[in-house]
Amino acid sequence: MDLKAFRDSLEADQPPAGLSPPLAALWQAAKGDWEAAHRLAQSDGSAEGAWVHAYLHRVEGDESNAGYWYRRAGKTHAKTPLDEEWAAIAGTLL
């Protein structure tokens, strides 16, 4: 799946089958369900899960908590607009 197909899948009521937890979290975040997205990101102990977790705390407006998760992910604390970061993470994980 590429980024366009992933974005197009947001028209559906359910995420595509077989998404990793970090990608499923990004899908839920894009659908506006922060709680579901956070549960998915938190359940994944990988660096990718930590990266999505950091993004979600930026969405929430908790930059301090986001910073912790960026460090766990080995990533620089993002300053780009949220929609750009979402696309960058999704594109990398896809």
Image (cartoon, rainbow, N blue to C red):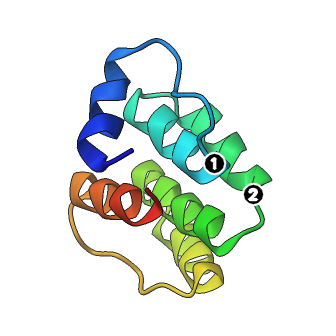
Left or right: 39, with 51 as reference point: right
Q: Circle 2 sits in a helix, a strand or a loop, which is it?
A: loop
Task: Name which residue lies at 73% across and 54% down.
Answer: 42
Task: Name which residue lies at 58% across and 59% down.
Answer: 53
Residue at mark 2: 44
| Foreground disc of the pair 2, 1 | 1
Residue at mark 1: 20
Few, some or many residues within 10 Å of mark 2 (<14, 14–19, 20+): some
The first of marks 2 and 1 along the sequence is 1
- What is the C-alpha distance between the residues marked 2 and 1? 9 Å
Q: Is residue 9 above or below residue 80?
A: above
Task: Name which residue lies at 52% across and 28% down.
Answer: 16
Q: Circle 1 sits in a helix, a strand or a loop, which is it?
A: loop
Left or right: 84, with 22 as reference point: left
Q: Is residue 24 above or below residue 94?
A: above
Amino acid found under the numbered disc labelled 2: Asp
Q: Residue 13 location, x and y as percent?
A: 47, 12
Contact between labelled residues 1 and 2, with CB atoms less than 8 Å apart:
yes
Q: Is residue 35 above or below residue 75?
A: above
